[in-house]
Amino acid sequence: MSIATMIYRAFDLGMIDEQEKSVLYRNSTRRGWRGPLQVPFDSPSEMPIERPKMIRRGLRVVIELGTSKVAIKAALNLPEKEIEQIAGLEPGFFRPAAEVHSLATAKRQTLKAVDVESGEVIEFPHATKRS
């Protein structure tokens, strides 16, 4: 919320009179607080986004003590993604680790066909991959 909005709201509620409102507007202009990203701490460089640490640490301790991630999700009753964002956890923290399965390799067999006219067996070599 901008300082100008707070000044106007204070005037609207009767907390300050017309003269005080004018003085506050002049002071905010003099200090360079008028316009977009001019209010103190509006700029992300002046006030970085807070990254919660204690919630994340608390969850890790509870898990180390033996509480399952499923039980934590059930107790908090929030979507996984939301818990991860609030606690500052890495995305996918509550998803189980994926199991890696190796795929079976196809056995190559030589293709054979019988020539109908001569009765001779014809073998076809495997095609090689072209790059």
Image: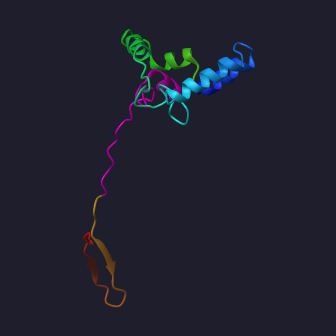
Q: Is residue 127 magenta?
A: no
Compare residues 40 and 26 and report the one nearer the observer.
26
The residue depicted at 55 percent of the width and 16 percent of the height is 76
The residue depicted at 50 percent of the width and 30 percent of the height is 32
Compare residues 109 and 127 and report the one nearer the observer.
127
The image's colouring method is rainbow
The quadrant of the rendering that contains the C terminus is bottom left
Residue 61 image-quadrant placement: top left
Residue 82 falls left or right of residue 56: right
- Tell me the magenta residue range: 79-106
Where does the image place residue 1, in percent across and percent down from the top left?
60, 26
Query: Up-down: is 62 above or below 79?
Result: above
Q: Is residue 76 visible?
A: yes
Q: Is residue 79 visible?
A: no
Compare residues 52 and 11 and report the one nearer the observer.
11
Where does the image place residue 40, in percent across and percent down from the top left?
48, 25
Residue 34 falls left or right of residue 60: right
Which residue is outermost to the bottom?
Answer: 117
The residue depicted at 61 percent of the width and 25 percent of the height is 25
Principal secondary structure, stretch drawn in magenta: loop
Q: Is residue 104 magenta?
A: yes
Where does the image place residue 31, in percent across and percent down from the top left?
49, 26
Query: Up-down: is 118 above or below 27?
Result: below
Residue 64 falls left or right of residue 80: left
